[in-house]
Amino acid sequence: MAQFTLVSGSVGLITLQNPPVNALSAATRQGIVDMMNKALNDPEVKSVVVCGQNRIFCGGADIKEFGTKISGPPLIPTIHTIEATNKPVVAAIEGSALGGGLELALGCHYRIAHSKARLGLPEVTLGLLPAIGGSQRLPRLIGVPAAIELITTGRHITAAEALQLGLVDHVTRSSTVDEAIKFAQSVEGKSLDSRRISNYPCPHLPDLDAVFEGVMQEVRQKAHGAIAPIACVQAVRAAATLPYLEGMEIERQLMETLFTSSQARALQYTFFAQRAVSRWSMPSGARWDTSMPKPVHKAAVIGLGTMGRGITVALAQAGLSVVAVETQEKQLKEAKLVVSGILERAAQRRGMAPTLAKITYSHDIRAVADVDLVIEAVFEDEALKEKVFQQLSAVCKPGTFLCTNTSSLDVDHLASLTHNPELVVGMHFFAPAHVMKLLEVVYGSKSSPEALATVMQLGKRMGKVSVAVGNCWGFVGNRMLKPYMEQAFYLLEEGATPELVDQALVEFGFPMGVFRMSDLSGTDVYWKIRKEAEPVGASGQEARVRKGLRYSPLGDLLCEQGRFGQKTGQGWYQYDKPGSRVARPDPWVHNFLEEYRARHGLVARRIDHAEVLERCLYSLINEGFRILEEGIAAGPEDIDMIYVFGYGWPKHRGGPMFYASMVGLAKILERLEHYHRAHPDVPFMQPCSLLRKLVTCGSPPVHKWKDVIKKIHSQL
Ligand SMILES: CCCCCCCC/C=C\C=C\CC(=O)SCCNC(=O)CCNC(=O)[C@H](O)C(C)(C)COP(=O)(O)OP(=O)(O)OC[C@H]1O[C@@H](n2cnc3c(N)ncnc32)[C@H](O)[C@@H]1OP(=O)(O)O
């Protein structure tokens, strides 16, 4: 797992060998310890270069080993030995030097990086902190403010930025290992006293207490309940205030707490789940590894409202030629300005030229005749989308993939209006489409594996976390949101306020609660969807029982008052003016709720945060089990990534299905049964049979659920 070669007569070259990213598995750590001992004890070796096989230095600890019993040697003593030796040790950094990989490099006396290398301490994103001395060495090398920023965000930086910060000594465009070998020879026999970072004093910061107080406040606010960023700040504070060895002891203690935390498990699950969703499968048995995507060089976007503009930006940034079509002249002009502005600002940030020439604009749908793939993003109106799909089917060249950005319409129905329904796939983007990471890729009953493979690959090119799901009302994300929102309305009927419900959800870790979110997106958006789904209700009616089931008309009644949320300055909260982002509790809403309860003879009771969470989250999770049972999502990871990357589910809780496994399936089942007994007229609270079966099977861990589901399906 690590190889030693004597090169140029005096340089011991140690190469980490653990594909694909040379992660520090037990065997690799053992290899480093053995090869380093060999190099340091060999009198022929006058200097050492450490590098990684296949042009990647090291991706850090082997994350697969976390959660298992850690075996193999620890690296801290070896890094101390490296730092203390009188033979110069040079890290030759190509590809990535991340986490434990960068910590190893920080123990070396010199660091030479390739210009395309990326460096970082991303432990925080896995619920950990850099605990092989990284939290103590980095601030000593680059100063407290820069170290805090890198360690608390886990950001990967370029070699150029690393050079600017003083994190590396030299950046090269040629062979890093050759340069490192030459450099190592040039410093053989020279004093290394000034190269041992652990001996450096931490650069002085005036008013240290005030700095850390401010940083802690900011980090806490951004963390939404995650504990690792807080521990990272505490560790850097130890570096800034304590001698090195005492700081190392604090680093160890903090890591001990984090290492076994449920948050670390959730974040590590998310790391692998994010990668697992790219390995999609369809109920037909078609899979990612047996289906060939078609090349997409030129794409088109139809409709340049907010979504269409974002999609155009995302496609252009992914390097595609784009035809952007909008029939309304005024909207087209405005879109051109907005799209160009976004691309120019983004290019400026990256120090690159904007990709404006990649886009041609047209008001004529016939301009898409020669594209490989079209994304329809017109207003969410069934008749309009039907017309567009019929037109597209007539004007596009044979074989063009036709995609829809619908969030609520039936993909199969749109496909049925075209000559080639196998080429139709849903691409459900989230606003703003060029920023949000999630892409829900919806295959219809006729979509071909090739069409799905093509769209999944396009999503990857756009930098999205693309999740393939089956076609059903609301797909996965919005379908699960329905019971969640429904419960929030019921809680208001029973005595809660929008603030109470939202506070419980924010404390759980969501960036905002359901009512604040509803105000932000427009309360009328779901009103329209409710009206379409329930033409008899959703307007002008107070009835709380519809078709024998519980219904809350609260959202409809609010909309009838013209309170459409932030954009109108009034919704579930009040705002200083339309468009203002500062939401304040609204006495009008409290009064509206009291009058409503009085009209219906409802007596308000005290509702606590635990009840809010159980009812909103468990009903959502229950729907997730139904989605799994029906095969709409292939596995729990798919649902979890949709919620983490599209709906603000806190990453440190891993997604709804992972969270359910942490809470315990038996407990979820028991609470759903409890609420369903109290409200038999709420079908979303009736426990799904898959949940019952999983509990009967002894509540297997989340990565085993797919096997249980497969078994159930094979028995049908
Ligand atoms: C008190 C108790 C103390 C106990 C102490 C225990 C010992 C701890 C020792 C050291 C701790 C150090 C802390 C760390 O180092 S934590 C790890 C930090 N590193 C990372 O977070 C990097 C994660 N990886 C990445 O960011 C990327 O993978 C990258 C390296 C940039 C490469 O990206 P890309 O080229 O896009 O490739 P993929 O992401 O698709 O990855 C390819 C496959 O490799 C797998 N992978 C990647 N990194 C790791 C890793 N560190 N460990 C294990 N596996 C890794 C990834 O899952 C892909 O696999 P697959 O193809 O099967 O999906």
Image (spheres, helix red, strand yellow):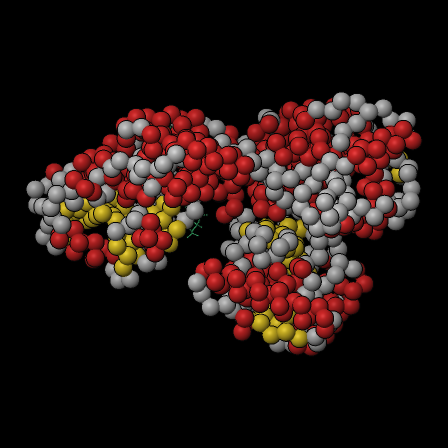
Residue extending farthest to the left is 43
Please, is residue 650 above or below residue 430 in the view?
above
Residue 608 seen in the current view: yes
Residue 614 seen in the current view: no
Residue plotted at (70% across, 50% down): 579
Residue 68 percent across, percent down from the top left: 41, 30
Residue 417 percent across, percent down from the top left: 76, 66
The image quarter in which residue 44 lies? top left
Which residue is more in the foreground, 464 or 198?
198
Direction from residue 618 to residue 250 in the image, left or right: left
Residue extending farthest to the front is 206
Residue 706 percent across, percent down from the top left: 58, 39
Quadrant holding the C terminus:
top right
Residue plotted at (49% across, 31% down): 227
Direction from residue 574 to residue 294 in the image, left or right: left
Residue plotted at (64% across, 57% down): 427
